């Protein structure tokens, strides 16, 4: 009883007392054998007006903060907003740095692709020149071949090849 007397004057315990009495009251109303239905509208009509008014007043009344919440509440909300803004600004800055690094990598890859394409073009041109040189050597060999010791069929073959080479050269 000593503890009840000490704590009864604090709003936190007053609210609890009322909540527990309401719970007990609801249990007795809903669980009583005299009621035929468990309809909430019937139960609320059984409650007294004084209890209803007191309950409504307590629902709208804010309970006092506890010790821990008081300690946390002492920190200025502006400081929280400021720290949030600084964190957000730092995140934005990091995102910008990442974006710049990504763009630099893309630019570097683009330059490497351009160099690779240029090297392929140079290689293709060199291969074409090499193929043309080989073809010229083969054509020169066919044009300079001595047909005097050959059979008629061989002579006809080499003459047809020489005519093809001359036709390509004139085009």
Image (cartoon, rainbow, N blue to C red):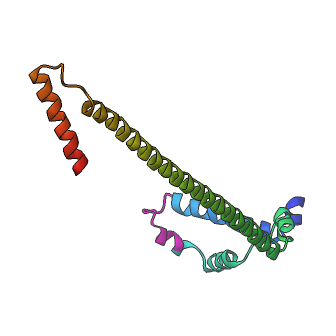
Magenta span includes 123: no
Q: Residue furthest front?
A: 148
**Location of residue 107 in the rendering, given as x and y in whole percent from the top left corner:** 58, 59
Residue at 69% x, 67% y is 92
Residue 127 sits in quarter: top left
Nearer-the-camera pick, 11 or 165: 165
> Vertical placement of 147 versus 19: above or below?
above
Is residue 24 at least partly visible in the picture? no
> Vertical placement of 125 versus 142: above or below?
below
Q: Magenta span covers which residues?
A: 33-44
Residue 60 sits in quarter: bottom right
Question: In the displayed structure, does residue 106 sit left or right of residue 156?
Answer: right
Residue at 17% x, 39% y is 163
Is residue 157 at least partly visible in the picture? yes
Residue at 46% x, 44% y is 123
**Location of residue 130 in the rendering, given as x and y in whole percent from the top left corner:** 40, 39
Nearer-the-camera pick, 163 or 88: 163
């Amino acid at each position: 009883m000593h503890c009840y007397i000490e704590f009864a004057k604090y709003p936190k315990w007053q609210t609890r007392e009322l909540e527990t009495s309401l719970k007990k009251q609801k249990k007795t109303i809903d669980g009583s054998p005299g009621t035929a239905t468990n309809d909430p509208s019937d139960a609320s009509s059984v409650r007294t007006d004084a209890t209803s008014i007191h309950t409504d007043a307590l629902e709208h009344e804010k309970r006092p903060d506890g010790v821990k919440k008081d300690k946390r509440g002492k920190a200025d909300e502006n400081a929280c907003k400021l720290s949030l803004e600084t964190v957000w600004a730092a995140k934005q800055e990091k995102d910008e740095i990442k974006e710049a690094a990504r763009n630099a990598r893309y630019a570097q890859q683009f330059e490497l692709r351009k160099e690779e394409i240029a090297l392929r073009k140079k290689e293709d041109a060199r291969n074409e020149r090499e193929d043309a040189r080989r073809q010229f050597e083969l054509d020169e060999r066919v044009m300079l071949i001595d047909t005097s010791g050959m059979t008629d069929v061989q002579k006809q073959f080499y003459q047809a090849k020489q005519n093809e080479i001359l036709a390509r050269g004139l085009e």
